[in-house]
Image (tube, helix red, strand yellow):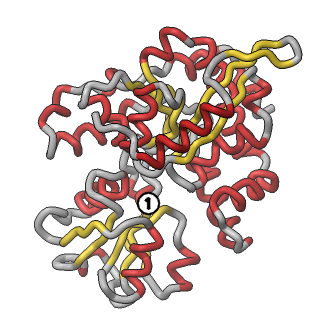
């Protein structure tokens, strides 16, 4: 495994100076300090911010520092090294870490399908016109790459032969290239309807309407933490499922958090984004074996080692199932 890049090491080192990942005493009560990573600024990733801003860590005896880390590889390395105890990630980074020998495991999944849309130039009005066109992603192997290839296959377009796929960078860079006419289409985080109208682009495909199972945003940790700190895992998950209930039932306070977290200033677009994800985030976020199988199948096309992986090797649903069986999750919606 490669080491963390210098920027990530500096961030984590600073956080460790401020707060150690070990139990501390606060007003006579033991509080477990930990570091929680996230690598995207989209609504599903805001769940850990909701936990932070609504005091759900403290409510469950936790003191958390949130650390933004760009890129799944850096994130999984930090988790394996023990610098970060819980990371909010999609399925591909965790699978890659597991294939490299990392003892990682997903304990939750807040979405079990893709939430991407394929947008194209105004003169491209349907998917049949994509053959021979140039499409853009962030980087090969990233979630956007997975999503684009799966969506194209679903509409019977061969991503290896019928289109050209380029690595361009983040969503802003890809949109700039599309608007300038340097590419023909790109994959974007949903919802993009209002922005598509603004930039005179067409939304050709919406992954949620294709019903493709996928391991979208989830919580990754290690088998070691589950073994040695199971009580911490349980407390974290109590806060996590409560954050989901807040997302679904408290629109106005959550929109304010989303506005700060996702940098969405336009009220109409903010409402569109919130409404879209309110329906797609799972009330009971048990890690999805079906969604992970999709990730495994796609990965196996380029990495034969993935063919030997079973979804159960990478998921541990018992913490969510315990909360479900106890009636705790249902009680949050009464």
Pinpoint residue 233: horizontal percent, then vertical percent: 59, 19
Residue positioned 47% across, 55% down in the render? 115
Q: Is residue 172 above or below residue 321?
A: below
**Number of numbered discs overlaid on the protein picture:** 1
- Relative placement, left or right, of 149 versus 15 is left
Where residue 39 appears, as percent x and y from the top left, is: 50, 48
Instruction: Write down the quadrant of residue 290 in the picture.
Output: top left
The percent position of residue 97, horizontal first and vertical second, equals: 31, 33
Q: Depth check: give the residue in front, 235 or 318.
A: 235
Q: Is residue 220 left or right of residue 234?
A: left
Label 1 sits on residue: 116
Which residue is located at x 47 percent, y 49 percent?
Answer: 7
Residue that extends furthest to the top in the rendered view of this protein: 228
Query: For this rendering, which residue is in front, 12 or 271?
Result: 12
Residue 205 in view (yes/no): no
Q: Quadrant of the C terminus?
A: top right
Residue nearer the viewer, 257 or 159: 257
| Residue density around tag 1, few if under 14, some if 14–19, many if 20 or more, within 10 Å | many
Position of the N terminus by quadrant: top left
Residue at 64% of width from left, 43% of height from top? 47
In the image, residue 50 sits, relative to residue 156, either above or below, namely above
Residue 283 appears in the picture as rendered = yes
Q: Quadrant of residue 178?
A: bottom left
Closer to us: 299 or 41: 41
Mark 1 secondary-structure assignment? strand
């Amino acid at each position: 495994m490669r080491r963390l890049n210098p920027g990530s090491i500096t961030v984590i080192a600073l956080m460790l100076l401020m707060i150690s990942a070990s139990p501390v005493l606060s007003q006579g009560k033991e509080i477990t300090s930990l570091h929680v990573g996230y690598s995207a600024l989209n609504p599903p990733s805001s769940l850990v911010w909701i936990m932070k801003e609504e005091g759900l860590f403290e409510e469950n005896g936790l003191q958390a520092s949130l650390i933004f880390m760009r890129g799944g590889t850096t994130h999984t390395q930090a988790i394996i090294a023990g610098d970060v105890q819980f990371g909010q990630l999609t399925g591909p980074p965790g699978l890659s870490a597991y294939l490299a020998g990392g003892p990682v495991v997903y304990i939750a999944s807040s979405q079990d399908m893709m939430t991407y849309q394929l947008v194209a130039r105004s003169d491209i009005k349907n998917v049949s016109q994509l053959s021979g066109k140039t499409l853009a992603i962030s980087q090969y192997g990233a979630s956007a790459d997975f999503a684009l290839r799966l969506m194209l296959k679903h509409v019977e377009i061969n991503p290896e032969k019928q289109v050209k796929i380029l690595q361009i960078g983040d969503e802003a860079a890809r949109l700039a290239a599309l608007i300038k006419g340097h590419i023909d289409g790109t994959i974007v985080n949903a919802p993009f309807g209002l922005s598509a109208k603004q930039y005179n682009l067409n939304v050709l495909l919406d992954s949620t309407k294709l019903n493709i199972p996928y391991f979208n945003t989830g919580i990754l940790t290690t088998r070691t933490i589950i073994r040695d700190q199971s009580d911490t895992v349980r407390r974290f998950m109590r806060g996590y499922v409560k954050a989901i209930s807040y997302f679904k039932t408290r629109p106005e306070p959550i929109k304010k958090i989303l506005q700060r977290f996702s940098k969405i200033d336009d009220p109409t677009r903010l409402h569109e984004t919130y409404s879209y994800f309110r329906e797609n985030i799972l009330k009971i976020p048990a890690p999805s074996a079906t969604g992970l199988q999709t990730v495994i199948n796609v990965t196996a096309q380029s990495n034969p080692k993935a063919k030997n992986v079973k979804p159960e090797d990478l998921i541990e649903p018992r913490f969510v199932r315990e909360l479900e069986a106890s009636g705790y999750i249902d009680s949050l919606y009464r």
